[in-house]
Amino acid sequence: MRANELAELTAFIAVAEERSFRRAAARLNLTPSTLSHSLRSLETRLGVRLLNRTTRTVSPTEAGQALLDQIGPAFASVDRAVEGVNAFSARPHGTVRLNVPRMAAALILAPLFRRFTQAYPEVTLEVAVNDAFVDIVSGGFDAGIRLGDSIRQDMSAVRVSADFRAAIVGSPDYFARHPPPRQPQDLRDHLCIGRREISSGGLYRWEFEKDGKSLAMPVTGPLVVDTFDTLLITAAVEGIGLLYAADILVAKELADGRLIRVLEDWSPTVPGFHLYYPGRRHVSAALRALIEMIRVES
């Protein structure tokens, strides 16, 4: 098989699997126009239409699906063989591009930077901190980190943190001025530190759960931010209002008494963070090294 024919089939598999020229182009590090040209050449050579194209969707035709079923496993086997050979390379090298929320950057990545860079000096970690949901494929990222319940099913995912619980906290000074809430509805009479969701632009509703009953409470207060940062913990410690946070983020302040926890019986468990990456994409030795260092047991 000639090199151009192999490239055309590789392009077809990527577009057929991703159902998108844009995502397939990011996967192969090519431009959408290059992929489109390759697909037209393949269809001309075979004399059959392989993809149905509209302005919004791309899907295999009957002939295209039959071709994908035949050659897809073979190409996947080649990818696995190449990955196996990479295991014999001297050392992981290159750049690993990650997209992570601020909380995961602080809790998961920051503590291992020194250990990872010392173990793999030829690997560069390029980290984009972004609390908005990002398509890591079209964004050109090798992997991302998000909460386990927010990852698409077509992604491969590795757990990188334990589950945690929500914590509603306030300072002793705040509770000297306001009676502690006994149930979520009491928050209507409290000052709460709000968070604006970047993806929707709306204010996050505080989520509660007890005895199989779930609530999402709108809250109001003197401060609203669009990301979780130490700024929020400082504001809560200074008595600005109540804060809804992950318990692991305020553990120190709870332990030394600067914050007091309320509504604990209503606080839900939140799925932990997972590192995820495209399931069909070859995993580089550098990303594999990071996965092995960062993973935690379920």
Image (spheres, grey):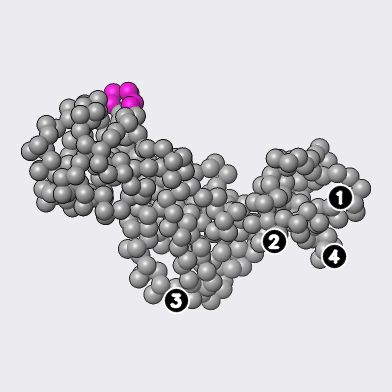
Asked whether the residues under the numbered discs 2 and 1 touch, taking CB atoms below 8 Å apart as contact, a structural biologist would say no
Q: Mark 3 — residue?
A: 121
Q: Secondary structure at mark 3?
A: loop
Q: Residues within 10 Å of mark 1 (few under 14, many from 20)?
A: some
Asked if residue 223 can be seen in this view, the reply is yes
The quadrant of the rendering that contains the N terminus is bottom right
237 in relation to 8, above or below: above
81 in relation to 234, above or below: below
Q: Amino acid at mark 3?
A: Pro
For the residues labelled 2 and 3, the Cα–Cα distance comes to 29 Å
Q: Residues within 10 Å of mark 3 (few under 14, many from 20)?
A: few
Observer-side mark, 2 or 3, equals 2
Q: Residues within 10 Å of mark 2 (few under 14, many from 20)?
A: some
* Of the image marks 2 and 1, the number of the one nearer the N terminus: 2
Which residue occupies 28% across, 23% down?
Answer: 211
Residue 228 screen position, x and y as percent = 33, 50
For the residues labelled 2 and 1, the Cα–Cα distance comes to 19 Å
For the residues labelled 3 and 1, the Cα–Cα distance comes to 45 Å
285 in relation to 271, above or below: below
Which residue occupies 14% across, 32% down?
Answer: 180
Q: Mark 2 — residue?
A: 30
Q: Mark 1 — residue?
A: 43
Residue 194 screen position, x and y as percent = 30, 41
Observer-side mark, 4 or 2, equals 2
